[in-house]
Image: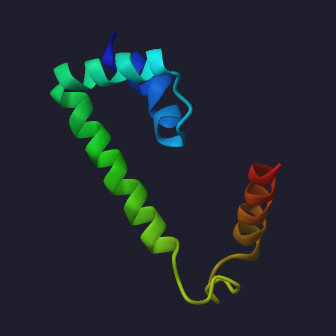
Amino acid sequence: MSCRRTIDDFLMRYFEGGLTLSERIRFNLHLAMCIHCRRYLDSYRKTMALEKAAGASDDDSQPPPDMPEQLVKAILAARAADET
């Protein structure tokens, strides 16, 4: 399995818990042999944690006052699309 295929085919489903048993085994075998993918996976995990921490606040109801209204609308539309 190539690194490119590992990243493209498995990473998002890995984090979403969507891999079959066979896919998880193949993914874990690749990770066991590939330091580059292990480092990338670690970096990806840290990025996700930072993103989650950055989005966590006491008041998510109001955007910052200097945020362009068009950006707020685009974010809300993207969230709505994700919920469907």
In the foreground, 56 or 23: 23
Looking at the picture, the colour scheme in use is rainbow
What percent of the width, then of the height, locates residue 75? 71, 63
What percent of the width, then of the height, locates residue 70? 76, 69
What percent of the width, then of the height, locates residue 62? 69, 86
Query: From the viewer's perspective, is residue 83 above or below residue 12?
Result: below
Query: From the viewer's perspective, is residue 50 above or below residue 59?
Result: above
What percent of the width, then of the height, locates residue 58? 56, 89
**Occupied quadrant, residue 80:** bottom right
In the foreground, 26 or 78: 26
Q: How many marks?
A: 0
- Residue at x 54%, y 41% (from the top left corner): 16
Q: Using residue 37 as the reference point, say whether residue 59 is left or right of it.
A: right
- Residue at x 45%, y 63% (from the top left corner): 51
- Residue at x 69%, y 76% (from the top left corner): 68
Q: Using residue 31 as the reference point, say whether residue 61 is left or right of it.
A: right
Furthest-top residue in this view: 1
Please state, as top left, top right, bottom left or bottom right, where the N terminus lies in the image. Answer: top left
Q: Using residue 22 as the reference point, say whether residue 69 is left or right of it.
A: right
Query: From the viewer's perspective, is residue 47 above or below residue 32?
Result: below
- Residue at x 35%, y 50% (from the top left corner): 45
Q: Using residue 67 as the reference point, say whether residue 27 is left or right of it.
A: left
